[in-house]
Amino acid sequence: MRAPDIAERLRAAGCVFAEDEADLLVAAARTPEELESMVERRAAGEPLEHVIGCVDFARVRIALEPGVFVPRARTEFLVAQAVALASPGAVVVDLCCGSGAVGAALGPVELHAVDVDPVAVRCARRNLPAAAAVYEGDLFEPLPAALRGRVDVLVANVPYVPSGEIALMPAEARDHEPRLSLDGGPDGLDVARRVAAGAREWLAPGGHLLIEASEQQAARAAEDFARAGLEPRVELSEELEVAVVIGRCST
């Protein structure tokens, strides 16, 4: 099957970047039979990243499995803010780690990653360095007690889509990614509040919590950080249309 024929099938299925996707599918397939299966899956609406089994994120190739949240390009802004705060050897905790994409892009740090989804945890263990510790559980729950008061950077790419807006998301996200990786509650900030409320127990003096949020949510999230005893600030990326809310633990 030739790439132009694949592109025509994908275009008919509604894929906007049909030609580019066709080239990626041809490059990823090992046999004609596998290529046909991959084209059928993509035409049926499965995310391209799940079909080809990987995504390039922050200059790192991230392996993905079906049903795992697909890292977004806008989250590279969160990575950039975390990298600026995480010196080599820093103790870093990545909550809601998903495939491990954020942690994989952070460089030489002492990394601890957590996700509640066992499929995501399996994926993160494939993507993260052997020295990284990956835990399955809800937010801080599975972290070892020895980390309390030692974390220099706590980064959490929390779900932040308001519950009422899930139905408005593209079908490939709504139907193929776990709802728990998307749904942030009525205003999108439920999980972010839980993370902020527990952060001071784990952060070292001068340590930082970082979360991603929409530009519209940033001010409210900063207020939640302040109520949790953190000194908040907001960084905005107009290009990526995303905010990173940063809270510093002063004591």
Image: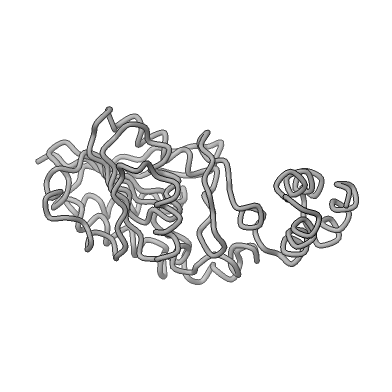
For residue 37, which quarter of the picture?
bottom right
Please provide percent x and percent y for residue 19: 81, 45
Q: Is residue 57 above or below residue 219?
A: above
Along the line of sight, which residue is nearer the eye, 4 or 71? 4
Task: Identify the residue shown where x is 51% and y is 71%.
Answer: 164
Q: Is residue 133 above or below residue 175?
A: above
Total labels: the figure holds 0
Q: Could you tell whether 118 is left or right of 237 in the image?
A: left
Task: Identify the residue shown where x is 21% and y is 42%.
Answer: 231
Please provide percent x and percent y for residue 97: 38, 53
For residue 151, which quarter of the picture?
top left
Please provide percent x and percent y for residue 234: 35, 40
If the image is split into quadrants, where does the C terminus sit?
top left
Q: Residue furthest front?
A: 31
Along the line of sight, which residue is nearer the eye, 116 or 133? 133
Please provide percent x and percent y for residue 34: 74, 58
Task: Identify the residue shown where x is 48% and y is 63%.
Answer: 182
Its colouring scheme is one colour
Along the line of sight, which residue is nearer the eye, 46 or 168? 46
Q: Is residue 251 above or below residue 219?
A: above
For residue 33, which quarter of the picture?
bottom right
Q: Could you tell whether 92 is left or right of 159 in the image?
A: left
Q: Could you tell whether 113 is left or right of 67 in the image?
A: left
Task: Identify the residue shown where x is 58% and y is 46%.
Answer: 55
